[in-house]
Image (cartoon, rainbow, N blue to C red):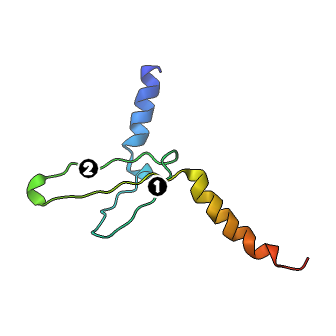
Amino acid sequence: MPLSSLYALFCYLNNPTYQYCFRLEAGDCLLVQNFRVLHGRKAFNPNSGSRHLEVAFVEWNDFTGRHDFYRVKDDLYLVH
């Protein structure tokens, strides 16, 4: 990849227009489609307390398959 392309990518990544920053609180749950979101975190100061993060990976087809089933299920009982 040419250096100019890397620089352009770096400019996009560091442009606040394309960033969404927020703080997770205790008990929050965040679902992310990993192929569509570039994620990261800011520096952590260990003197400010502790942090605990649990991660689970769900196959995307398993997630959308259930959604599609419930979306179509009600339509099966409609008279056309």
- Horizontal relation, residue 66 to residue 30: left or right: right
What residue do we see at 89% from left, 80% from top?
79
- Horizontal relation, residue 45 to residue 9: left or right: left
Which amino acid type is marked by label 2?
Answer: Lys
Q: Quadrant of residue 50?
A: bottom left
Query: What is the number of the mark on residue 32?
Result: 1
76 versus 10 height, above or below: below
15 versus 69 height, above or below: above
* Residue pointed to by mark 2: 42
Query: Is tag 2's residue or tag 1's residue first in the polypeptide sequence?
Result: 1
What residue do we see at 44% from left, 34% from top?
9
Q: CA distance from mark 2 to mark 1?
A: 18 Å
Give the total number of marks visible in the rendering: 2
Residue 25 point in image, percent of width and height: 28, 68
Q: Nearer the viewer, residue 65 or 12?
A: 65
Q: Dot 1, how many residues are within 10 Å of its Cα: few (below 14), some (14-19), or many (20+)?
A: few
Residue furthest left in the image: 47
Residue 53 point in image, percent of width and height: 29, 57
Is label 2 or label 1 in front?
1
What residue do we see at 46% from left, 55% from top?
32
What residue do we see at 50% from left, 52% from top?
33
Query: What is the number of the mark on residue 22?
Result: none
Which amino acid type is marked by label 1?
Answer: Val
- Horizontal relation, residue 67 to residue 59: left or right: right
Disc 1 element: loop
Q: Nearer the viewer, residue 10 or 40?
A: 40
Residue furthest right in the image: 80
Q: Dot 2, how many residues are within 10 Å of its Cα: few (below 14), some (14-19), or many (20+)?
A: few
Residue 48 point in image, percent of width and height: 11, 59
- Horizontal relation, residue 47 to residue 42: left or right: left
Disc 2 element: loop
Q: Are marks 2 and 1 in contact (CB under 8 Å)?
A: no
